[in-house]
Image (tube, rainbow, N blue to C red):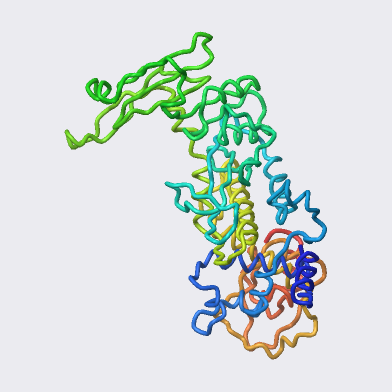
């Protein structure tokens, strides 16, 4: 990415940005940190009243905007005209492939859902789509396969009519073809859930042929011909909780209509109406919650369908903001958000399985900041100098320097002890020690004991402290 960015800068301006992989790590670390703070204008991170030291000390404002505006993944001249026609996402393909590889390595649950996800973007591009009833209806459309917990397992960014050329069955349409593309990484025996945009009898038959069960809400004009369902008026007279079922002659597909506040039609190759359970719904007539009968297919659909919405919800909390007219930058940042979201969901799930207390598990913002802090520290390694004069540093006894992440604390020989010229000793930052010392680490800027009896400095830099 650094080579492509430098090369493009030379081609456009005649000058190289002279960026490196380490500087780009720092760039992404700073960008992630910004997303956690959420200032309305990027310039505010450098302004006097709102300056953020970890950001302003990492980059000048001009340098940050230079990198952000010229960030590239590939060298344009290395991509042939034929490749550009076949793949409209060629500008970000290497990074996109790397993220997809990570998603494909995740284990598959027995229940997965497919839905549309929007990559917010209002600039000019032929890839832009409009999907109503989405929180961000305008942008690049992304078909996503996710677990109920919100872990993204696979995705396909929509490029237009030629996106699913290999699955272009006319009877399936775009939605059905998207499902067939995403199930390429799904093993037989899986149950898939999707909404009315995707569901059709042809799709369920195609999935059944692969050993995959499908369930989804369905449009009334897609139900099998000759099937007559009760009208909304008839269902309303029968009352809330009324349902009916139709099963195909081969027994491999059923259609269930359920009336709550309005009729809902579902189609499935694995679930049916029975056994029914009860759910509680608000009654405007009685001004209280009342029990309403609910078919089994509805209950199972509600439990398993929200995976993509959960992923969107997690990403939206600290989405990387980019008011920029380049769809490539917007998509690169979205891929970073997907990676962070997936990583945190896995981290949280692993810690829950280990029965860790809630306060011991990092929240999403803490997790993002920990990743950002590590990336910034890695980017600063090449700029570190061992000749800094620490003796002249102003001593601030009440200001505590945060303990860096484990990977940064244990980085080779950059961590060296030094005796500080301060009037009073400072509290040792090793968790197992309560003593005071005047020795500090030249990289971490934290104080650690070095005595005949113990070496907190060595302990902190060789194992988890």
> In the rendered view, does 405 fall on the left or right side of 324?
right
Examine the rendered structure and indicate whether residue 267 appears above or below residue 453: above
**Residue sitting farthest toward the bottom:** 392
**Residue sitting farthest toward the top:** 249
Q: Residue at x 69, y 91 (%)?
A: 392
> In the rendered view, does 261 fall on the left or right side of 9?
left
Residue 460 visible in this rendered orientation of the protein? no
Percent across and percent down for residue 376 are: 68, 69
> In the rendered view, does 155 fall on the left or right side of 316?
right
Examine the rendered structure and indicate whether residue 406 appears above or below residue 288: below
**Residue sitting farthest toward the left:** 286
Examine the rendered structure and indicate whether residue 346 appears above or below residue 216: below
What is the quadrant of the N terminus in the image?
bottom right
What is the quadrant of the C terminus in the image?
bottom right
Percent across and percent down for residue 60 are: 65, 80
Q: Nearer the viewer, residue 173 or 453?
A: 173
State the image quarter where residue 169 is shown: top right
Residue 14 visible in this rendered orientation of the protein? yes
Q: Nearer the viewer, residue 184 or 308?
A: 184
């Amino acid at each position: 990415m650094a080579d492509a960015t430098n090369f493009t800068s030379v081609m456009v301006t005649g000058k190289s940005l002279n960026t490196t992989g380490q500087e780009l790590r720092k760039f992404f670390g700073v960008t992630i940190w910004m997303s956690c703070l959420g200032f309305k204008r990027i310039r505010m991170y450098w302004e006097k009243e709102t300056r953020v030291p970890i950001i302003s000390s990492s980059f000048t404002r001009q340098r940050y905007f230079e990198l952000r505006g010229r960030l590239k993944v590939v060298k344009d001249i290395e991509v042939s005209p034929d490749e550009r026609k076949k793949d409209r996402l060629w500008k970000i393909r290497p990074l996109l492939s790397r993220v997809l590889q990570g998603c494909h390595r995740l284990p598959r649950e027995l229940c997965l859902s497919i839905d549309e996800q929007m990559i917010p973007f209002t600039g000019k591009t032929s890839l832009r789509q409009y999907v109503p009833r989405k929180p961000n209806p305008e942008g690049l459309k992304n078909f996503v396969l996710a677990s109920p917990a919100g872990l993204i397992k696979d995705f396909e960014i929509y490029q237009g009519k030629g996106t699913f050329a290999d699955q272009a069955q006319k009877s399936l349409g775009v939605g059905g073809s998207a499902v067939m593309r995403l199930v390429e990484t799904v093993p037989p025996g899986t149950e898939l859930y999707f909404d009315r945009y995707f569901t059709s009898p042809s799709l369920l038959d195609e999935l059944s042929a692969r050993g995959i069960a499908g369930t989804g809400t369905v449009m009334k004009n897609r139900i099998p011909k000759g099937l007559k369902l009760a009208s909304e008026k008839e269902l309303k007279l029968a009352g809330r909780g009324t349902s009916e079922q139709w099963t195909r002659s081969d027994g491999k597909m059923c259609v269930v209509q359920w009336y709550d506040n309005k009729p809902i039609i579902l189609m499935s190759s694995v679930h049916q109406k029975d056994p029914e359970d009860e759910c509680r719904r608000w009654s405007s007539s009685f001004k209280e919650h009342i029990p309403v009968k609910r078919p089994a297919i509805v209950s199972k659909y509600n439990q398993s369908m929200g995976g993509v919405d959960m992923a969107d919800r997690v990403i939206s909390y600290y989405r990387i903001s980019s008011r920029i007219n380049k769809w490539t930058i917007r998509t690169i940042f979205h891929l970073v958000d997907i990676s962070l979201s997936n990583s945190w969901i896995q981290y949280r799930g692993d810690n829950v399985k280990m029965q860790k207390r809630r306060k011991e598990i990092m929240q999403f913002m803490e997790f993002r900041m920990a990743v950002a802090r590590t990336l910034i520290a890695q980017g600063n390694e090449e700029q570190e100098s061992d000749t800094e004069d620490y003796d002249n540093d102003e001593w601030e006894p009440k200001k505590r320097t945060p303990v860096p992440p484990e990977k940064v604390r244990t980085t080779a020989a950059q961590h060296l002890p030094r005796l500080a010229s301060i009037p009073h000793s400072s509290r040792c930052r090793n968790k197992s020690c309560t003593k005071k010392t005047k020795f500090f680490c030249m990289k971490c800027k934290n104080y650690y004991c070095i005595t005949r009896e113990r070496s907190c400095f060595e302990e902190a830099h060789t194992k988890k402290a």
